[in-house]
Image (spheres, rainbow, N blue to C red):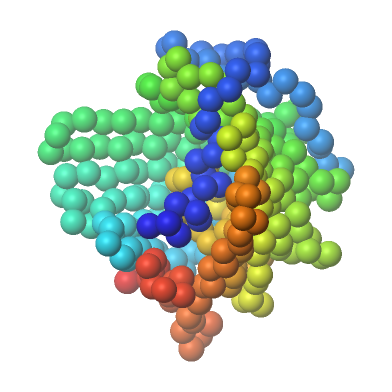
């Protein structure tokens, strides 16, 4: 359980409360989107790696077996003859007769994600939850931010870049009605060739973590697939931005007076044809099966 919480810390740290006096824009009932309050760096080259909506189209499903926890499954549909995701369906296999969450992707004329609408429908308890993720571009077509709107919560993701177009930082916040704005930041540091992220500094008003990553030489099938933090947990580390697969993750809580670090190895298994078929942590607390 401790490991799960540590690996997920990047998806949750931005929801802590703090009043930064940010201006609010737009509306969602009683909830408004918050401005970051300062400008982030823009690139000389536009890559928009976070808004491609791409997966290896050989992946039809991912089945997650979690020790001591509920199993989970993701299924994918693609635009014809592409690696571009049209729809993602998420459900708990033991509960799929009652509830599913469908993510529908829409793309703009530049083939970048324009929006993702999540519709979680429970026919047994008769409720429906809709969340809309809007990808916001400037006049040059650069992805500047992602906004999530739902009935009770909003999220913002503001994105800064290196000159070569790689993602440099993401400032994010998530809150409900009455919560104060508290942006946290993830800062991304790459290897010399800008192929893989080798370090992330993650900070907010209440947490301060550093993560280091080591990689194999195999192609990471998840690069280019991103909606928002915490949506797609089959990632190991920053898989949405790195070219290869994370085989070791080291985590340090910089607020821990004992200066402790924890390292979590991961193992990837391939078919004879070279396709990823399974990956897991070293203790088999999480095992991901591809197309099972």
> Is residue 239 at all visible to an observer of this figure?
no
Q: Residue at x 51, y 85 (%)?
A: 273
- Tell me residue 222's x, y (percent): 55, 60
Relative image position of residue 11 (x, y in whole percent): 51, 44
Q: Is residue 235 toward the left or the right of residue 40 in the image? A: left
**Where's residue 180, x and y in %?**
53, 19
Between residue 76 and residue 284, name the one nearer to us.
Answer: 284
Q: In the current view of this chain or complex, which residue is farthest to the front?
A: 258
Q: Quadrant of the C terminus?
A: bottom left
Residue 61 is left or right of residue 71, and the answer is right
Which residue shows up at 52% across the image and 47% down it? Answer: 9
Tell me: residue 135, above or below residue 282: above
Quadrant including the N terminus? bottom left
The residue that appears at 53% across and 68% down in the rendered structure is: 264
Q: Position of residue 205 (x, y in %)?
A: 62, 31
Q: Quadrant of residue 74?
A: bottom left
Tell me if residue 267 comes above or below residue 78 in the rendering. below
Which of the two residues, 218 or 16, is positioned nearer the viewer here? 16
Between 84 and 26, the one nearer to me in the picture: 26
Asked whether residue 236 is in view, the answer is yes
């Amino acid at each position: 359980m401790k490991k799960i919480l540590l690996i997920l810390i990047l998806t949750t740290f931005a929801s802590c409360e703090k009043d930064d006096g940010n201006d609010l824009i737009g509306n969602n009932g009683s909830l408004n989107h918050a401005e970051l309050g300062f400008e982030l760096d823009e690139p000389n080259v536009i890559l928009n790696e976070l808004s491609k909506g791409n997966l290896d189209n050989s992946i039809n499903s991912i089945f997650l077996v979690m020790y001591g926890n509920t199993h989970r499954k993701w299924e994918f549909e693609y635009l014809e003859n592409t690696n571009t995701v049209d729809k993602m369906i998420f459900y708990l296999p033991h509960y799929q007769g009652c509830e599913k969450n469908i993510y529908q992707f829409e793309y703009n004329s530049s083939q970048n994600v324009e929006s993702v609408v999540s519709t979680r429908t429970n026919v047994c308890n008769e409720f429906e939850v809709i969340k809309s993720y809007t990808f916001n571009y400037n006049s040059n077509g650069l992805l500047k931010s992602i906004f999530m709107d739902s009935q009770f919560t909003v999220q913002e993701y503001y994105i800064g870049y290196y000159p070569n177009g790689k993602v440099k930082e993401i400032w994010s916040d998530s809150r409900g009605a009455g919560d104060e704005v508290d942006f946290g930041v993830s800062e991304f540091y790459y290897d010399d060739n800008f192929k893989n992220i080798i370090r992330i500094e993650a900070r907010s008003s209440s947490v301060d973590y550093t993560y280091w990553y080591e990689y194999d030489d195999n192609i990471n099938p998840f690069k280019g697939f991103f909606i928002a933090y915490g949506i797609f947990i089959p990632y190991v580390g920053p898989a949405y931005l790195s070219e290869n697969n994370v085989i070791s993750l080291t985590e340090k809580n910089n607020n821990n007076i004992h200066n402790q670090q924890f390292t979590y190895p991961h193992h990837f298994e391939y078919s004879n044809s070279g396709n990823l078929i399974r990956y897991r942590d070293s203790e088999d607390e999480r095992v991901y099966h591809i197309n099972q």
